[in-house]
Amino acid sequence: MARLKLGVLISGRGSNLQALIDAAADPAFPAQIAVVISNIADVQGLARAQAAGIPTAVVDHKAHDGRPAFESALTEALDAHQVRLVCLAGFMRLLTKGFVDHWRDRIINIHPSLLPAFKGLNTHERVLDSGVKFTGCTVHFVRAEMDEGPIVVQGAIPVLSGDTPDSLGARVLAVEHRIYPLAVKLVAEGRARVVGNAVRVDMPDGDHDTAAQTVVINPAG
Ligand code: GAR
């Protein structure tokens, strides 16, 4: 079967992009990266794509007169590569309703918290200040409201006493690198479908039973 064509939008380091590049290096992975687009030139993520032989483009928001013009240029670049699923991977621009509606149910994002908790920036600092005992990361379909939308996959980890934003962020990031390829795989295989505000995921019975048994308690006591 033809692999689903991805367009990955980045603004920086691109470690989640790298996780997708590594997953897609397996010919059995049901998606391939058709283009990587950054709104900032010379970021590490572009170098990662180039090293993997993936086409890249820079669509600089500052070079466009307003958000709709910037987003038209993004859609043009995505269409030029026949992209069918847009993956935001550390893409740090807010998107208008027009763009999000155009790509509705064909655009996903990764966010470093267990949404709907801790939308926005500086999540790990706010998690530590709040005293919650678990945090994690979320891949979700994108809606016009920031960090809103049907959730495809979440990964949860305990917050440890003594954690700093950096130590917590590093553990969350390692989980991000696992759940983003998984979410793309589920969407590409047609096993994750938006139903209302949720995503219904078709899972093998065995996996479902294992998940149903999973309990994590923190502190373990
Ligand atoms: C990741 O932690 C991602 O979840 C976060 O930016 C980082 C990008 O890292 N995204 C957001 O905060 C979006 N609201 P990366 O460039 O190494 O993938």
Image (tube, grey):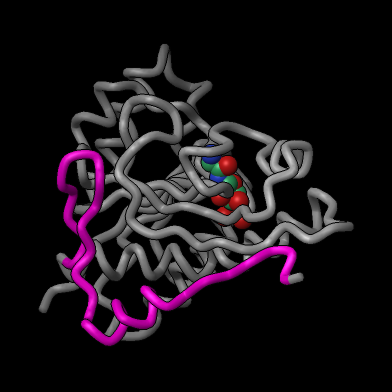
Count how many numbered circles sit on residues in the image.
Answer: 0
Q: Position of residue 156 (x, y in %)?
A: 55, 61
Residue nearer the viewer, 96 or 171: 171
Q: Is residue 100 above or below residue 186?
A: above
Drawn side of residue 178 relative to residue 36, left or right: right
Q: Is residue 201 magenta?
A: yes
In this orientation, does residue 173 appear? yes
Drawn side of residue 160 relative to residue 139, left or right: right
Residue pushed farthest front? 221
Q: Position of residue 188 (x, y in %)?
A: 22, 66
Residue nearer the viewer, 136 or 142: 136
Q: Position of residue 64 (x, y in %)?
A: 43, 19
Residue pushed farthest left? 1
Q: Is residue 5 above or below residue 64?
A: below
Span colored in magenta: 191-220
Residue nearer the viewer, 122 or 96: 122
Drawn side of residue 3 relative to residue 7, left or right: left
Q: Position of residue 68 (x, y in %)?
A: 32, 18
Image quadrant in which you'd find residue 193:
bottom left
